[in-house]
């Protein structure tokens, strides 16, 4: 009883009104809190202005599974593979993640071509977590730029484009994206270098912006933002499997020019000048070996280049204010000049430097087809086979590159630059792209055998 009374007395003390007890002191010192406004530095402010326009892009690829015809022997299966229409059962969807940035209130999204190149259906996720369907407006693999449009009637937050022609090495930039599926990740760094050449040697990208802002798989298509919260680049590539502090972005000036063409026309409209170029190796004491010069290998009669006075044998040293060191770089820089705008070329003719200005005209599908026929010696047509259409070689000009390779009338053209074709309309569209790229890669089938054959058609 005495113990119980003592316990009740102790409990009573705990609830006595007006009695204060000292609190235990903190084991570690704490800084005085500062108002958020005092911590909102330029990076925070730029991030706040930008994050709402960044989206995660998911592309679903429909994969079809081949189903053999019951009871078919090997000969029938091979016939189906090359000539017929094999049966497929319902496939499954594989989702790949990338990033994008909304560049207009109507929902146009700027991203990379390689993010959307194999998808069948697309969805984007906004900062608030909503997922909305999107469709591809157009892609340009040559610059790795693509445009999606979000299918909604509401006005969306967007990020205004700045400029990339005045970027300074060392200035602060911010990368926002979806690395490894971690949505709306923000990293910061500086512009490490400008005018970098990166990518596949067969299809390099020039004039890329190098940054040490951490860019990883999944960042592709996301924005590179300056300290003012303006879009200055589209993150596109890393060096190796991991960024290691070296990432690359497409300059926004180029990305916007390509995007505007894709939105207005569904493709990039490029100018035709009539100039063909090739790499010419020359001895260089400076580098202790051969270096490349860009030599004019041909000028088409009646073309803008012919009217401007460009001659076969001229050496192109620069396009605009940028020096060129290879035929691939020349073609890339010519693509940067809008259709009809003056194209300033620095020409070396013998020992004399001659400035030349050429105004390009639009390259029509008919003109592209005619040029490819002249360069290769191939004349193509359509044939129906078992209810389907194929593109076949009608004739091969004697002594032409196609004849030297051994192509024959009756050969089938199944692909052009990795794009399947089944009609002359497909061929003409592919011809324009091949003419722009300066290279024509054909998948040619003869019987059950198929082979890829490459022509230079610049």
Image: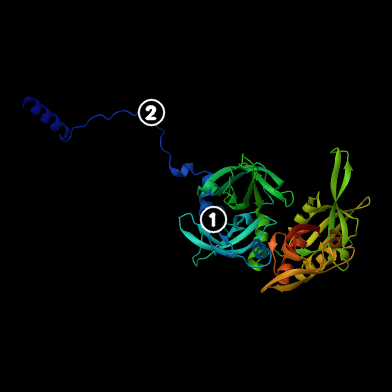
Residue 185 to residue 424: above or below: above
In screen coordinates, is 289 left or right of 451?
A: right
Toward the right, the furthest residue is 350
Q: At 74% across and 69% down in the image, what residue appears?
A: 391
Q: Quadrant of residue 415?
A: bottom right
In screen coordinates, is 372 left or right of 354?
A: left
Q: In the rendered structure, are the residues bearing label 1 and label 2 in contact, judged by CB atoms less than 8 Å apart?
A: no
Q: Quadrant of residue 88?
A: bottom right
Toward the left, the furthest residue is 1
Instruction: Report, in whole angstroms, how far the alpha carbon at label 1 lies from the one at label 2.
Output: 51 Å
- Residue 50 locus on image (x, y percent): 54, 52
| Count of marks placed on residues | 2
In screen coordinates, is 259 left or right of 411?
A: left
Tell me if residue 85 can be seen: yes
Q: Quadrant of residue 252?
A: bottom right
Residue 28 is labelled as 2
Residue 164 is labelled as none
Q: Is residue 443 or residue 447 the one in the foreground? A: 447
Q: At 85% across and 60% down in the image, what residue appears?
A: 401
Q: Is mark 2 on a helix, strand or loop?
A: loop
Q: At 61% across and 61% down in the image, what residue appears?
A: 147
- Residue 10 locus on image (x, y percent): 14, 29
Tell me if residue 57 can be seen: no
Q: Is mark 1 on a helix, strand or loop?
A: strand
Q: In which quarter of the image is the C terminus?
A: bottom right
Q: Quadrant of the N terminus?
A: top left
Residue receiving disc 1: 94
Residue 290 to residue 143: above or below: above
Q: Is residue 79 or residue 316 the one in the foreground? A: 79
- Mark 1 or 2 closer to N-term? 2
């Amino acid at each position: 009883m005495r113990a119980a009374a003592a316990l009740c007395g102790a409990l009573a003390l705990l609830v006595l009104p007006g009695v204060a007890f000292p609190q235990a002191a903190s084991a570690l010192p704490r800084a005085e809190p500062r108002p958020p406004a005092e911590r909102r530095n330029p990076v925070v402010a730029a991030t706040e202005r930008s994050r709402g326009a960044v989206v995660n892009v998911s592309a679903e690829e429909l994969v079809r599974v081949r189903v053999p015809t019951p009871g078919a022997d090997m000969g029938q299966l091979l016939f189906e593979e090359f000539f017929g229409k094999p049966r497929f059962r319902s496939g499954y969807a594989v989702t790949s993640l990338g990033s994008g940035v909304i560049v207009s209130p109507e929902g146009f999204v700027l991203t990379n071509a390689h993010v959307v190149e194999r998808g069948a259906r697309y969805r984007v996720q906004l900062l608030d977590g909503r997922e909305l369907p999107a469709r591809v407006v157009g892609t340009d693999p040559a610059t790795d730029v693509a445009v999606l449009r979000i299918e909604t009637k509401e006005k969306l937050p967007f990020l205004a484009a700045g400029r990339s022609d005045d970027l300074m090495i060392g200035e602060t930039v911010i990368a926002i994206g979806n690395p490894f599926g971690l949505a709306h990740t923000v990293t910061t760094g500086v512009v490490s270098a400008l005018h970098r050449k990166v990518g596949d040697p067969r299809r390099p990208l020039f004039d890329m912006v190098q940054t040490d802002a951490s860019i990883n798989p999944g960042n592709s298509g996301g924005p590179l933002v300056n300290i003012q919260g303006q879009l200055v680049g589209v993150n596109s590539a890393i060096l190796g499997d991991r960024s290691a502090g070296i990432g690359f972005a497409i300059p926004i000036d180029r990305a916007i020019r390509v995007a505007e063409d894709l939105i207005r026309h569904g493709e990039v409209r490029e100018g035709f000048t009539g100039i063909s170029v090739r790499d010419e190796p020359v001895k260089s004491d400076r580098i202790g070996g051969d270096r490349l010069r860009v030599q004019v290998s041909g000028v088409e009669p009646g073309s803008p280049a012919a009217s401007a006075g460009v001659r076969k044998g001229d050496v192109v040293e620069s396009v605009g204010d940028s020096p060129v060191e290879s035929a691939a770089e020349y073609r890339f820089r010519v693509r940067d000049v809008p259709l009809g705008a003056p194209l300033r070329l620095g020409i070396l003719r013998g020992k004399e430097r001659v400035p030349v200005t050429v105004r390009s005209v639009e390259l029509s599908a008919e003109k592209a087809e005619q040029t490819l026929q002249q360069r290769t010696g191939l004349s193509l047509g359509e044939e129906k086979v078992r209810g389907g259409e194929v593109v076949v070689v009608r004739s091969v000009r004697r002594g032409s590159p196609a004849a030297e390779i051994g192509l024959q009338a009756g050969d089938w053209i199944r692909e052009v630059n990795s794009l399947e074709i089944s009609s002359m309309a497909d061929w003409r569209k592919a011809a324009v792209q091949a003419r722009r790229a300066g290279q024509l890669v054909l998948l040619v089938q003869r019987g059950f055998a198929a082979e890829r054959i490459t022509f230079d058609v610049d």
